[in-house]
Image: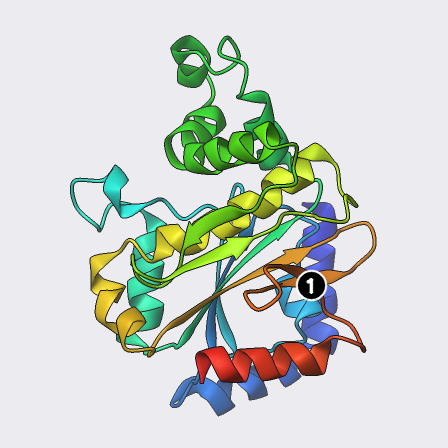
Amino acid sequence: MDRILRGIMKYRATDRKTMVEQFQRVRDNPEPKAVFFTCMDSRMIPTRFTETNIGDMFVVRNAGNVIPNSQNFPEEVTTTEPAALELGCVINDIRHVIVCGHSDCKAMNLLHRLKCEEFSSRDNRLISPLRGWLIAHANASLKKFEKLETGGFHQPLLFQAETPMRKFVAYIDPDNKFNIEDKLSQVNCLQQLQNIASYGFLKKRLETHQLHIHALWFDIYTGDIYYFSRQNKRFVEINEHTVMGLIKEVNRYYS
């Protein structure tokens, strides 16, 4: 708290005036461009690595960047995540939803350990809200990962896209650059696109291309950011050599 309080005092002396001016500019006409779901990990600072500013994005963070599937609830208004989707995409008419996973994700590391039946037992779930959260809402990611593992990490996975009839193929880490848990993290990131598409209040927007869903993945230890390219069927590093091709793909698929 000492560090936080001193930080607030530094903000008051250096950045407060500029930020208030920015708040004033967007107060009456904010135009956020994306709803950005990411992990609560303290190393994830999405506004910094996307160079976005005040008024640009709605940011939603939780353990493991998980968006529960609507089938898990008797109603679609049960948790923060679908409420954020409604607030962003319906009430504020935001056209893009981005899910961003990352390497060395503690939630995904734990999810991988939940393959062990004893570790994921009901008794252990009762004493660990995090285990309960992951078992309830990230089990589909784990099942897909186990399918990938059974195929020796060479076979592609199939995910539902914006509608049940639209699907996309994904090769997970075909260059074998990442460890097992990071592969699971990438699977989990793509599974959330399928979960987002499960909500009925988004159905028409997704079918009529008024709403688009994307996946990013951040490698914490290199600073590299990857975009899932449906054209390439894999996560592609965003860099000087790939960015124009990715922009063309985005414009073609999501214009």
- What is the secondary structure assignment of the residue under circle 1? strand
Front one among 62 and 152: 152
In the rendered view of the protein, which quadrant contains the C terminus? bottom left
| 131 displayed left or right of 70 | right
Q: Position of residue 11 (x, y in %)?
A: 70, 69
| 241 displayed left or right of 95 | right
Q: Residue at x 57, y 36 (%)?
A: 148
- Quarter assignment of residue 133: top left
In the rendered view of the protein, which quadrant contains the N terminus? top right
**Is 11 drawn above or below residue 175 in the view shown?**
below
- Quarter assignment of residue 27: bottom left
Q: Residue at x 64, y 35 (%)?
A: 106
Q: Residue at x 76, y 42 (%)?
A: 178
How many marks on residues? 1
| 149 displayed left or right of 193 | right
Q: Position of residue 141 (x, y in %)?
A: 48, 38
| 13 displayed left or right of 68 | right
Residue under circle 1?
236
Q: Position of residue 61 (x, y in %)?
A: 50, 52
Q: Position of residue 204 (x, y in %)?
A: 22, 71
Q: Which residue is situated farthest in the left direction here?
A: 74
Q: Residue at x 70, y 67 (%)?
A: 49
Asked whether residue 230 appears in the rendered view, the answer is: yes
Which amino acid lies under the numbered mark 1 shown in the image of this protein?
Answer: Val
**Is 125 drawn above or below residue 219 in the view shown?**
above
